[in-house]
Each structure stands twice: as structure tokens, then as C-alpha cells.
Amino acid sequence: MECCSGGNVYGEEFSPAFAESTARSYVRRGLSRVAGRMAGFLETRGVEGTSVLEIGGGVGSLCIDLLRRGADRATCLDLSPNYEESARALAQRYGVEGRLTRQQVDIARTPDAVPPADVVVLKRVVCCYPDCEALLAAAGDHARSRLVMSYPRVNPASRALLWAANGWNALRGREFRGYLHEPSALLGIPERSGLSLVMEHRGPVWSVAGFERPTAA
Ligand SMILES: C[S@@+](CC[C@H](N)C(=O)[O-])C[C@H]1O[C@@H](n2cnc3c(N)ncnc32)[C@H](O)[C@@H]1O
């Protein structure tokens, strides 16, 4: 899923226009309700002075928000090269560019290329990667204290939407596919890295799960 005949599968799907629209949405409206729930989970447990690793962060609005809430530094990973310009402008706008590092790395394939962090976040990412086991195992192993992620509900409506979106990509000759991983399977993976599930919110479209390393509680 890394490269297709013309380049990067994720770059084809997550374009500069997508990057710009997510950056604009953060500037105008702040975090979405789901992202706000993720940030709130971390903030109530103490975000001040922590290091943050955002996996599949796009323009990095969630880790930028956590930096604005007092996190010390953040690393934002993504596989699409198309976020960089909008991401740089967004970080500069909020004065956090000196505390934010961006890497175009697949942590599931090269976990050693990424430093661990106190807090790991994945917003709308597990549905964009086929091997959720490798992705969430690497995410869990990198989380010194906490991990929070959002993931889509699995129901007839989400299955139909995904089927249509994947079909549309197939018709256009695009290689990117979305995935609906079973929530019960997803939630077990960070636990195998020693994290405990301490918060679960089931939303109509996106659910949020928060994990904590028992020694960090
Ligand atoms: C739907 S977008 C969400 C972006 C951002 N989190 C947001 O909510 O605006 C999913 C992102 O995850 C990235 N992604 C998927 N698998 C990844 C992986 N293994 N490592 C890093 N990024 C990944 C994709 O490139 C894409 O930008």
C-alpha cells in the first residue's frame, strides 16, 4: 500500500486541497467534536509538559492544539507528502513550529525510526491502513503513558459508505482503500502493549477510546 505506479497511494488520496481544507477548518472552528473529546481525555489527565506523537496527523491540528494546551513538544507522522505547506503555515500561525517535528514515516513498518512519546494520538487513521494490528502495536509500544484514538462505527450505513467510496476509487483507478476494522479487535491491540482501556465513547459515526499505562495512572 506504499507506492503505486505513479507514486504514493496516500499522496493521491490526501491531496494539497484536502490538507488546506482541514487546516482552514481548524482555524475557523477549532477541533471537531470528536477531536475535542480526544484532547479533553488527555487534558483531564494532564497534558502540561508532555511529549506527543500524532500518527497519521495530516496537518497536525490535534497535536498543535495539544501544544497550545501546554504539551512540551510533538512529532506528527503522515504518509502523504501533501500536508507540508499547510502544516507549516498552521504551526507558524499558532507559534508552535519550534516545538513540532514532522516525519513522513510509516511507524507500522519502521517503528525504530520514530521516538517514543508520553502521549500517542490517532485521529481517523485506523480506517486508512490495512494492517491495524501492526499500526496499533507500534502505536501502543511508543506510548509511555497514554494513547487515544478515534475509529469508525461498524454498521450497515458505514459498510455501505465504505463500499461506495472504495468502489469510486476503483473506478478512477486509484489504489487507496478504506477499511472497517472490528472495534473489539482494535481495542485489544494497545492492551497487548501493556495499556489499559480507561475511556470509551461510542459516537454515531466515530468512537473514541483512551488507554493508560497502569504505572502512569
Ligand atoms: C483521514 S486522514 C486523517 C488526517 C488527520 N488525522 C485528520 O483527522 O485530519 C488519515 C491520514 O492517516 C495517514 N496514515 C494512514 N496510515 C498511516 C500510517 N501507517 N502512518 C502514518 N500516517 C498514516 C494518511 O496518510 C492520512 O493522511
Image: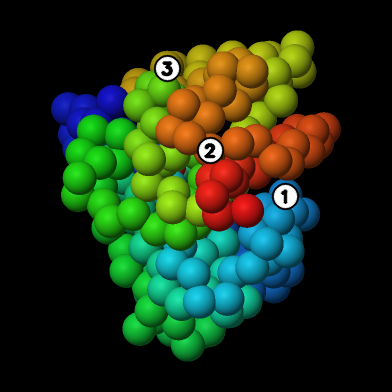
Percent across and percent down for residue 59 are 46, 61
> Is any part of residue 6 visible from this angle?
yes
Looking at the image, how many numbered discs can be counted on the residues? 3
Q: Is residue 149 visible?
A: no
Q: Nearer the viewer, residue 5 or 64?
A: 64
What number is the disc on residue 34? 1
Amino acid type, label 1: Val
Q: Secondary structure at mark 2?
A: loop
Q: Which of pointers 3 and 1 lies earlier in the amino acid sequence?
A: 1
- Disc 3 marks a residue whose amino acid type is Ala
Q: What residue is disc 3 on?
A: 170
Where in the figure is residue 17, as x and y percent of width and height? 47, 56
Labels 3 & 2 near each other (Cβ < 8 A): no
Residue 192 rendering spot, x and y as whole percentages: 46, 26
In-front residue for pair 171/28: 28
Residue 140: quarter of image: top left
Relative height, residue 110 to residue 65 (above, below): above
**Residue receiving disc 2:** 195
Q: What amino acid is at disc 2?
A: Leu
Image position, residue 80 (x, y; %): 33, 48
Q: Which mark is residue 22?
A: none
Closest to the camera, between mark 3 and mark 2, is: 2
Q: Earlier in the sequence, mark 3 or mark 2?
A: 3
Q: Residue at x 51, y 64 (%)?
A: 63
- Residue at 65%, 43% (x, y): give it: 210
Sort mark 3 into few (<14), some (14-19) or many (20+) by Cα contacts within 10 Å: few
Foreground: disc 3 or disc 1: 1
